[in-house]
């Protein structure tokens, strides 16, 4: 039997597949397609303290080899999640990551404190690409001082694992990673969607009301792979790599360059059973190569 377990820092996952934030909803949405006990971890969609309506439709627009989304972080809010969805996770043992976001530092901290009291939550994932309302709507990831304040205050508010989710836009990658290390963040996940634009030629207008949307899917994989490689090259923090993964070969590319686990996002919208397919492909690959464990090849290509 091939051993697919991986160590992400001192957290041991049964396998490297993490369902990424957003495309698996609150977990139950995929439960009718796959056994959620079989994946390494589940990340629920980004939660805010209060329910958030998100952007007006249209919210999804398909393009070549990917999709643009303008969901606008719509979610039910923390209280509803704890009441309606947390009981479901008590019935399974798969590690639970909760992606969180806020309009300012105070909201992130409040979320972290509330979730710290929920033992079922294995880790929180900080969405650092959100707009900081108090600073003119500029992303937290583009403001070094606010980034540092946010990370430090959340670290003091949550006693278990914290994942920092980095997108392609950041004030300075190496400096940001130094801050994450110094403040005691446990893992990095990368990458978030890339900024994109679409125009409706027939109606001569932008497709989305907010013009710019998040681009994800197979087309971004080379870009995501390069970003993950850059992160792995300059930090000791374990990395969960994601961006454009569709098949087991895609997943192995991220693992071979040093990601400790991989996140599945847009592919879940295409193949809801993608996690199962990818795990089977990785297992067959290792078996054919005569490699007894996945750990043996992580970071082999440098």
Image (tube, helix red, strand yellow):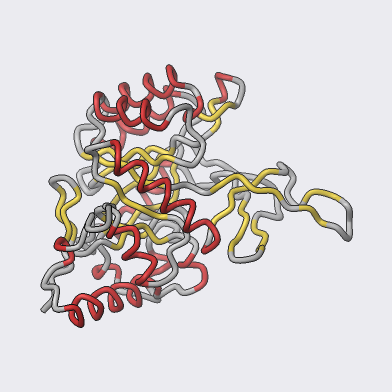
What residue lies at 29% left-to-right and 36% top-to-bottom? 234
Quarter of the rendering containing residue 37: bottom left
What residue lies at 18% left-to-right and 80% top-to-bottom? 287
Specify whether 125 is left or right of 167. Answer: left
What residue lies at 48% left-to-right and 27% top-to-bottom? 171
Above or below: residue 45 compared with residue 17 = above
Residue 220: percent from left, percent from top: 52, 56
Specify whether 118 is left or right of 103. Answer: left
Image quarter hosting the N terminus: bottom left
Which residue is at the far front? 302
Specify whether 261 is left or right of 144. Answer: left
Quarter of the rendering containing residue 116: top left
Residue 295: percent from left, percent from top: 15, 61
Which residue is at the far top? 145
Above or below: residue 72 compared with residue 281 = above
| Foreground of the two, 142 or 70 | 142
What residue lies at 21% left-to-right and 64% top-to-bottom? 15
Specify whether 213 is left or right of 131. Answer: right
Which residue is at the far right? 203
Residue 137: percent from left, percent from top: 60, 26
């Amino acid at each position: 039997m091939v051993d697919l377990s991986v160590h992400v820092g001192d957290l041991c996952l049964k396998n490297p597949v993490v369902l990424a934030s957003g495309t698996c909803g609150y977990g139950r949405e995929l439960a009718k397609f796959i056994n959620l006990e079989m994946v390494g971890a589940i990340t629920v969609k980004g939660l805010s303290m209060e329910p958030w309506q998100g952007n007006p439709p249209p919210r999804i627009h398909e393009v070549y080899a990917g999709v643009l989304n303008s969901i606008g972080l719509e979610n039910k809010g923390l209280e509803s999640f704890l009441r309606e969805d947390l009981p479901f996770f008590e019935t399974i043992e798969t590690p639970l990551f909760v992606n969180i976001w806020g309009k300012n530092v105070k909201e992130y901290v409040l979320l972290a404190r509330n979730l710290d009291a929920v033992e079922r939550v294995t880790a929180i994932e900080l969405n650092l690409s959100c707009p900081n309302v108090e600073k003119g709507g500029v992303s937290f990831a583009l403001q070094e001082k606010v980034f540092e304040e946010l990370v430090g205050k959340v670290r003091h508010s949550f006693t278990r694992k914290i994942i920092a989710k980095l997108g392609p836009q950041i004030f300075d990658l190496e400096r940001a990673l130094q801050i994450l290390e110094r403040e005691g963040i446990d893992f990095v996940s990368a990458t978030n969607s890339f900024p994109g634009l679409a125009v409706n030629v027939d109606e001569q207008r932008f497709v989305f009301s907010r013009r710019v949307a998040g681009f994800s899917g197979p087309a971004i994989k080379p870009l995501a792979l390069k970003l993950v490689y850059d992160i792995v090259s300059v930090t000791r923090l374990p990395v969960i790599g994601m961006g454009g993964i569709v098949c087991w070969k895609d997943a192995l590319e991220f693992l071979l360059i040093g990601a400790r686990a991989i996140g599945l996002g847009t592919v879940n919208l295409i193949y809801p059973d993608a996690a199962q397919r990818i795990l089977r492909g990785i297992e067959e690959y290792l078996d054919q190569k005569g490699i007894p464990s996945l750990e043996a090849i992580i970071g082999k290509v440098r």
